[in-house]
Image (cartoon, coloured by chain):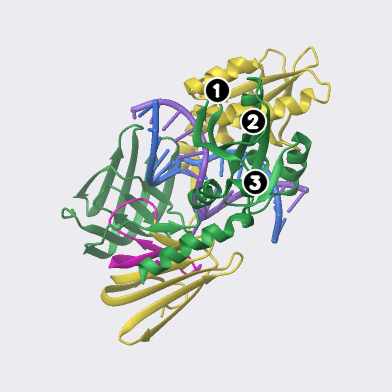
Chain colours: A green, B yellow, C blue, D purple
Amino acid sequence: MYRQGYVCIVIGICSIEYKGRATSYADSAARMLIVKPDGTLLIHESSKREPLNWQPPGSRIDANCKDNKLIVISKRYSPLETIIVEFTSLDALILCKLASTYLRVIGTEEDLVKSIINNPSTIEPGAEVIGRDIPTPMGKVDVVLKSKDGSLIVIEVKNERAGISAVAQLKRYVEHYSSMGVKVQGVLIAPSLSEEAKRLLYKEGFRFVSAHEFSKAKRTSLDMFIKRSN
Amino acid sequence: MYRQGYVCIVIGICSIEYKGRATSYADSAARMLIVKPDGTLLIHESSKREPLNWQPPGSRIDANCKDNKLIVISKRYSPLETIIVEFTSLDALILCKLASTYLRVIGTEEDLVKSIINNPSTIEPGAEVIGRDIPTPMGKVDVVLKSKDGSLIVIEVKNERAGISAVAQLKRYVEHYSSMGVKVQGVLIAPSLSEEAKRLLYKEGFRFVSAHEFSKAKRTSLDMFIKRSN
DNA sequence: AACTCTATGTCGGTA
DNA sequence: TACCGACGTAGAGTT
């Protein structure tokens, strides 16, 4: 049905059957089917950013015509998931070659963590960086500092407004270290904080540091990026 | 550029500038641009299920030609985000009308919760349903039961293999009720459990119930669905 | 609008 | 491969 390396787009009236982690069935209607050379399958309708049905990269595609119908079957293993698309009428069929580039995104949590590591004394004067992404039984801790008096500073970083779960995550880490008999201080760094999260944070005795404090460092990396791209 | 109600597909060589919650820039390359009547904008490449860049529904689109280039600008407010796509060459331009249907998905967490509520004694004989999606300062609790001895059973439901964060979520809820002086039992219901999560669960004294126990009820709802769709 | 959670999430990294 | 957490997550439901 499609040549190696080509993206295939089919526009027409189809019904869709999906069976896998969940199950769904869509009655006959006008839709757009996209098949990518990496096995990705997307079925889009007239609205929404998300496809109505899809199959992730690595899926196996197969197509055949029967009874004047185009039938497309996509299979994915582990977990086993199948999509069957049945076209009863076609409006367009397009083959094209598209690029495969790497997009660098600036301003992610990664960038924020980096600028924290470069400026630990913004959080506490004289604090030293112990490490980042430190694995514990409770998950990975974003950043760990050591303050001058020897106590630990455990930092959870969020790049978006932090909610209850962010504070709970921090709590898990702090409790892990304090249960080992270490003196620990919990710090949440985020652009902002929901009211509920704020309540929880102060109840736990943690500290909030605005991500804005690190915006200068962030801006620097942005400038470098813009310079690079011009 | 596009008529009301039509989906517009542009295939060609373009560069993309995105600025909003984050920032990115993509050099000139062959890509597919999709604009939906609800304002959704998608830019796809040769691989991946996710678009390289996008704009969600409700965004405002604008297009114009200048210096032999097609420039598409999409703006979204709250948060303010902008995408500028600059086409230097066009391979195809397609307009089509697509459907906008509602897809019913079977086998979600919602379905699992329902079958739990219909069979609470699978968890504990004689237990009664108190309620579901009960709001607490720690978030919403999936299901709360009351056992015959009057103690609470707090249930966290996951429709997929549960990890550490699922156990942590349950822990939050249990601690909330027990801090109010209520006797609480924590139960996690999921198809399976990661090893790390299992360790945490038993450490906390919670109970795991396989979602498989409720598969009969699930199957029933599936049967009804299949009957309906035929 | 803010907040919470689910998702066929997807994706990347790591052990 | 399993597990973990971020994501410009999106999307739905409630307050």
State left or right for residue C2 relative to residue B199.
right
Query: Of discs 1 and 3, which sits in the foreground?
Result: 3
Q: Amino acid at mark 3?
A: Ile
Residue carrying label 1: B214
Res. A101 mark: none
The magenta segment is: B25-50
Closer to the camera in the image, C14 or A223: A223
Rendered-image quadrant of the C terminus of chain B: top left
Q: Label 3's element?
A: loop
Chain letter of mark 2 equals A
Residue carrying label 3: A123
Q: Residues within 10 Å of mark 2 (few under 14, many from 20)?
A: few
Q: Position of residue B210 (x, y in %)?
A: 53, 20
Which residue does the image show at 75% across and 16% down from the upper left?
Answer: B147
Closer to the camera in the image, B5 or A204: A204
**Real-space Cα distance between discs 2 and 1?**
51 Å
Residue carrying label 2: A150
State left or right for residue A187 relative to residue A17.
right
Which residue does the image show at 42% across and 60% down from the upper left?
Answer: A45
